[in-house]
Amino acid sequence: MSRKITPVILAGGIGSRLWPLSRKAMPKQFLSLLSEKSLLQSTLLRVADSRFNAPILVCNEEHRFIAKAQIAEITDSFTLLLEPEGKNTAPAIALAAEFALQNGLTDPLLVMPADHHISDFDKLIACLDNAIALCQQQQLVTFAITPTEPHTGYGYIRQGEPLAHEGCFKVAEFKEKPALQLAKKYLASGDYSWNSGMFLFLPDVYLSELTRFAPKIADSVAKAASFTADLGFQRPVTNSLAACPSDSIDYAILERSANVAVIPVDLNWSDVGSFSALSKIAEKDHHGNYLASQGVSLDSENNLLISEADHTIAALGVSNQAIIHTHDATLVADKSALDKLPDLLKQLALVDSDKLTHHQAVFRPWGNYRTLIESTGFKVKKIIVNSGAKLSTQRHQHRAEHWVVVSGVANVRVGDNEFELTADQSCYIAAKQLHSLANQQNTPLIVIEVQTGAILDESDIERFDDRYGRD
């Protein structure tokens, strides 16, 4: 490879077709669906060698803490750009391109979604020299996937005339997701590939084409591209992005530019965009069942059984079912009906929209907490405080709290008293008492918190001292 490449990883998706596993507060890119690593972490590992510069990641403001925590488990060299709200791929890539140029990174950008599965990425690596050569000729290169079936859930790219570099073609046209009969024709012709959402281009060329075809996006991003470092994040100017149009790179540029090339790659690839897609690539038993770690089955075939830790799903005499269990919701569906999941979620939104948004784990700059149980007048949480981290000094008007240390050493303040608690020790914080919790050790601190009172949500927090700059 003649030049290094800067990976740009887009981590702003929601993944609603994987509900109840994936939700707005914890989208699929942060889930460990196919291995112990999350989809985001697996994406990072693909570009973790000397051929690549440190990655630039773009994620939504509300996911910043979980994103940072997961990235830091893979690499300590990265840039995390925050979008105050999702504006689709064209503005997100433009932010990364602006940041790259401001920091002297003129190398090609390899743009990838954070939530895809690829088991043989070395095949794409083998194409990079040809792709770089096309980039240096001012081309925008899209990597397409050689289709294996007449899939109706993917967009397609029709290849045009061959270019000088082997396996490279001009793009003749982009096609929307087709009906089944048309998808069969695409497959039979051999001229069509699946649109993967992976691209390679020089940052200045991308911004130039964006200015040409989507000037409002280019102008908004250029005004926003004065980045401020904050707690390890890079923040653009929020007000300048508010008026930025929302559009994909496909619609904004690629379908309109004459400088687009395609390289079809025979990858074992999936966008993991639905339970149907997950079922196809997940490892199964000899009866075609995906059982995860807690599933058992008897006289059952072709089922998808997924549950959160410590919950067992037992399938007896059933076939072709998807049974997905989480802490607060269970999906039971015939696998042939999974395409109708968005319609079901519209009904759920009318009954309990919170189930579409929140997840059991809530990530904060100091660590995370999980609500274990709650009912009228009480709530129980498991709190994990990272090494060296501290919760804000705060008080509550309507609730009392009882902290029990499970492991680690807690540095506690209650009122004017400061003290340490170790495993099996506890303390009580009355309503209206100032208090704080910190972990000054090298290992995580685990605390069980029992809340009692009339108001138990996050609105009953009055902060007085917060090292993370929260109100």
Image (tube, helix red, strand yellow):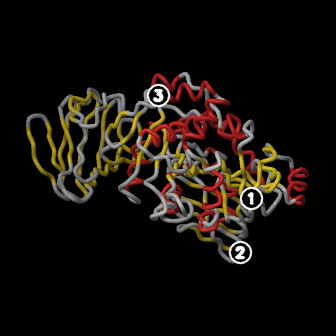
The residue closer to the viewer here, 231 or 323, is 231
Sequence-earlier tag: 2 or 3: 3
The residue closer to the viewer here, 40 or 193, is 193
Residue 187, given in percent of the width and then of the height, sits at 85, 58
Instruction: Describe the element under mark 2 as helix, strand or loop.
Output: loop
Q: Are marks 3 and 1 in contact (CB under 8 Å)?
A: no
Q: What amino acid is labelled 3 in the image?
A: Ala
Q: Is residue 162 left or right of residue 16?
A: right
Q: Quadrant of the N terminus?
A: bottom right
Q: Which residue is mark 3?
A: 224
Residue 222, given in percent of the width and then of the height, sits at 50, 29
Q: Is residue 277 left or right of residue 182?
A: left
Q: Residue at x 75, y 61 (%)?
A: 146
The residue closer to the viewer here, 312 or 1, is 1
Q: Residue at x 89, y 58 (%)?
A: 189
Q: Residue furthest bottom?
A: 286
Q: Which residue is mark 2?
A: 287
Dot 1: few (<14), some (14–19), or many (≥20) neighbours within 10 Å? few
Residue 49, given in percent of the width and then of the height, sits at 46, 65
Q: Residue at x 19, y 42 (%)?
A: 428
Alpha carbons under labels 1 and 2: distance apart: 48 Å
Q: Residue at x 41, y 44 (%)?
A: 362
Q: What amino acid is labelled 2 in the image?
A: His
Alpha carbons under labels 3 and 1: distance apart: 39 Å
Q: Which mark is residue 378?
A: none
Q: What amino acid is labelled 1 in the image?
A: Ala
Q: Which residue is mark 1?
A: 164
